[in-house]
Image (spheres, coloured by chain):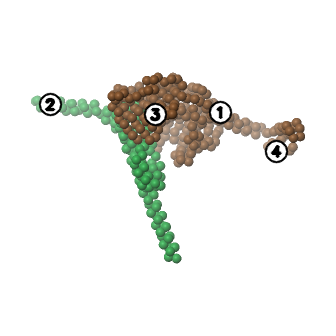
Amino acid sequence: MGPISRNHQCWRVGLGRKRGVFYLIHMNRLEIVRRSCFATGIFLLCSILSFPMSFKAMAGGFLREVQANGKLESAKGTIYYLSGKVDKIILKIVEPVDQWMVFEGNTLLIFYPNSNQAFKIESRNPFILPFFQFLLDLTKEDFGLSARGFRLSRYEKQRQRLISHWTPPKELIQIIGEVVLTHQNDALLNVQTKDPKGIICSDIVFDNHVSFQGVSFPLQIRITTHEKDSSSQEAIVFRDLEFNQSIPADILNFAVPAGAITKNVKW
Amino acid sequence: MGYRSILFKAVCGALSLLLLMLPVLGQQQDAANQARADARAKVNGGTWLIIGIFLGVIGYAIALLSPPRTPASALIGKSPDYVAVYSETFEEEGKKIQMRKALTGCLIGTGIQVALSVVLIAAASSSLDY
């Protein structure tokens, strides 16, 4: 047998004339390195992007600080999450005010026990809590990007890190240019969103990871958002995160007391 | 002397009330300002402009009826007064932006349609002349 291509030489080691023919492919060093990197990258990408995860409940303390327009605001409390037909997120805030926030689908309930006031906001769109949504997205394959219509355009390896570039679906192409994810081992370190001109719109850094069922959850999230005339920074620190533990009944079944002054708002 | 002391007490009382109200009024003004800024940042005027261009009056009506989504995280750790003012202001400001952009789009779309009609009529009448 002659060479198959310019870069390869092939020898046939035969066990018989037509059966059990084995080919040994001889490649030059550059080709070996190139194919090894490619295979390693594909392997890492697949292992990172597929999460066999069952995540029913979560609870933990949080401290959230937001710096915008020269002001620093903080809030501290406990967050509870329960997955179901409609996911439920409960925030029990203790500083700076006593406040309950219950997110359930298209309804947001806010209650102030000290003044016995409540707001029930119903929206046509489901409410989301961005800083917590990141944690939920970590349990999804490829951070939930494919499900939202994003497409992997390219990836690269830099030392120990895997950087993947995602292009948005058609309906978002005028707003988002690309999303860049940076992974190290199994941990997501960074998510960057760029506008169509390549300017960074938001930069999310994940740090201090803890592992649960093969998924690395960050205990610290820092979000920097750049808008037209301003930028803001948001920092969230979680503590004592517990997964799939039962949530106390008084939290889970929280309801506004009968005598509370409730304002209904419809969006 | 009697009426002077009453007047003095009344003025002091009014001033004290004003001083007590200032932080609350300041917070409400903060809520309103933040809500307007968030509405301008978060309501996608470009989308409503395009909707107005292609859907015309219907696009404008949709903008009028569709309230913007309030960013829920903006209400974390805020007082009841803040939440009330913020929610109302955000909705009003967001609707204004939506309506303004949709109306602009509607007018642009109408202008384009009129221009196209004139061109078509002119083309049709010139072809009839031949």
Task: Say which of marks 1 and 3 sits in front.
Answer: 3
Under tag 1, what secondary structure?
helix
Distance between the Cα atoms at labels 1 and 3? Answer: 32 Å
Residue type beneath disc 4:
Ile
Task: Say which of marks 4 and 2 sits in front.
Answer: 4
Q: Which residue is mark 2?
A: B6
Q: Which chain is green?
A: B
Task: Mark 1 or mark 3: name the one nearer the start of the chain.
Answer: 1
Q: Which residue is mark 4?
A: A4
Residue drawn at 43 percent across, 31 percent down:
A102
Q: Nearer the viewer, residue A218 or B83?
A: B83
Residue type beneath disc 3:
Glu
Distance between the Cα atoms at labels 2 and 3? Answer: 56 Å
Q: Nearer the viewer, residue A244 or B21?
A: A244
Q: Residue furthest left?
A: B1
Judged left or right of residue B71, residue A140 is: right
Per the rendering, the colour in which chain A appears is brown
Residue type beneath disc 2:
Ile
Q: Which residue is mark 3?
A: A104
Q: Residues within 10 Å of mark 3 (few under 14, many from 20)?
A: some
Distance between the Cα atoms at labels 2 and 1? Answer: 81 Å
Q: Are discs 1 and 4 less than 8 Å apart at CB?
A: no
Which image quarter: residue B75?
top left
**Where does residue B100 sit, x and y in percent of width and height?**
40, 51
Query: Which mark, by number, is residue A47?
Result: 1
* Tags 2 and 3 both on a single chain: no
Residue drawn at 58 percent across, 42 percent down:
A150
Residue drawn at 42 percent across, 55 percent down:
B57
